[in-house]
Amino acid sequence: MKAPGRLALATAAVVLTTLAMNTSAVAEKPAKKTEGEHVLVFSKTAGFRHDSIPDGIATIKQLGADNGFTVDTTENAGVFTPGTLQQYDAVVFLSTTGDVLNAKQQRAFEDYVRAGGGYVGVHAAADTEYDWPFYGGLVGAYFDSHPQIQQATVKVEDHDHPATAHLGDEWVRTDEWYNYRTNPREQARVLATLDEGSYSGGNMGGDHPISWCQTYESGRSFYTGLGHTKESYAEPEFRTHLLGGIQYAAGAVESDCSSAESDYTPIFDGTSTEGWKQAGPGSFRLEDGTLTSEGGMGMLWYEARQFSSYSLKLDWRMEGDDNSGVFIGFPPSDDPWSAVNNGYEIQIDATDSPDRTTGAVYGFQSADIAARDEALNPPGEWNTFELRVEGEHLQIWLNDVKINDFTNTDPARSLADGHIGIQNHGADDQVSFRNILVKDLP
């Protein structure tokens, strides 16, 4: 129950049905704010019901008691009114499933979020309200499927958020691992991903976010796919993970949850090759937001501008033992060999010699092969390069792992000013590219 001081201003408090799982009463009319945040846990289910919900409720209550925020719990969707919702700094959807709110309740929650309210989605919150577009954007991605419960490795991408600051780069644990219908990366800041090679049943092509946060229509949103099992709520690492997400959503702590890609500009956005030009034979086929090489040896290069100090990000995928590369630092030319002779190629071919294999500066410097092998996703799965050019200094990341650090000393070449291109190597080599993004650096 709320402390009496919070109810002092409510002239007619409506006490909701207390459920068998020990939900707290929720005031129907606005209550006066007291010190500390006020969080509502909502766990209504219209589909599968997780037996871990009582453990989740008990855990969040204990987290509140230990960290200075008040927790109310309910499964009554009737509390989704403007007067009631404004009492709360964040609402936790704890493994909700199916359609849990009617149209009027949905509008009230939309207005709450747009007014700066916080949302936390735990596990099956992504298996909720499939026909409500606002909610789909708020949670970030809808549930698709899951394999059996098993151990997997969680890779932490962002250690700056309070939900992940306490974790190492890898977190090995057992849970039910969701696949999602879409990847939330473009709209949300991904905090942690799943290593699909560490378990069976992942289907997101190697980039498999499992926890993320975002600002959404003036509100704060945090989602974690963890928390299916009862045992999760006894794990100190998971409890701290959940605490950090709640504190962020409730506004108790600050964190930058803008998309990691929000400060990048797409030079290929999946819909058009405007600004690009083919040099030499072959071509690239544009289909489903992806460029796939055909024939060659040629190169598709970005003619629209040259780049000097910048970060280039792009996703690439081989189908088998294929060959391609990303060219940087070359002058404009319709001859692809001009890029070979005047620029630098970052190789994509995992089976060649060390200075001509994936992550190498082709012909000049091998990648760190051990680090490269650890980071590299196999053929058929997407990989991400980040190429960071600052003057004559080039650093290369593969799937967020630094694998090469190169400085140009050749007076005939310069990384500091040039074009960007992707290679179509030959008829036997099919390599695909997507999400080609650039950010100018100081």
Image (cartoon, helix red, strand yellow):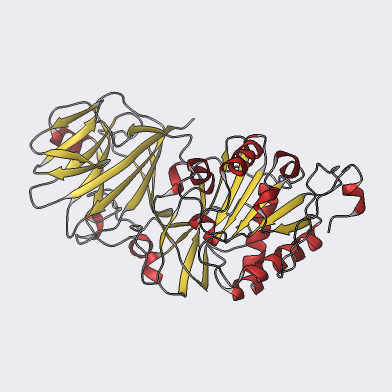
Residue closer to the observer: 32 or 428: 32
How many numbered discs?
0
Judged left or right of residue 336, residue 211 is right
Say left or right for 163 vs 33: left
**Residue 386 sits in quarter:** top left
Image spot of residue 360 (x, y percent):
28, 52
Q: Is residue 104 above or below residue 231?
A: above
Question: Does residue 387 appear anywhere in the picture?
Answer: yes
As displayed, is residue 61 above or below residue 257? Answer: below
Could you tell me which residue is drawn at 50 percent across and 44 percent down? 188
- Residue 415, horizontal then vertical, whole percent: 33, 35
Image position of 430 (left or right of 208): left
- Image coordinates for residue 403, horizontal then vertical, percent: 38, 55
Could you tell whether 233 is left or right of 277 in the image?
right
Position of 320 relative to 388 (above/below): below
For the N terminus, give its image quadrant: bottom right
Q: Nearer the viewer, residue 185 or 337?
A: 185
Residue drawn at x 39%, y 34% is: 438
- Can residue 236 be seen here? no
Q: Work out whether residue 223 or residue 298 is closer to the camera in this orientation and state it.
A: 223
- Comparing 315 with 6, the one in front is 6
> Residue farthest to the top?
304
Residue 278, position as x, y percentages in the image: 15, 31
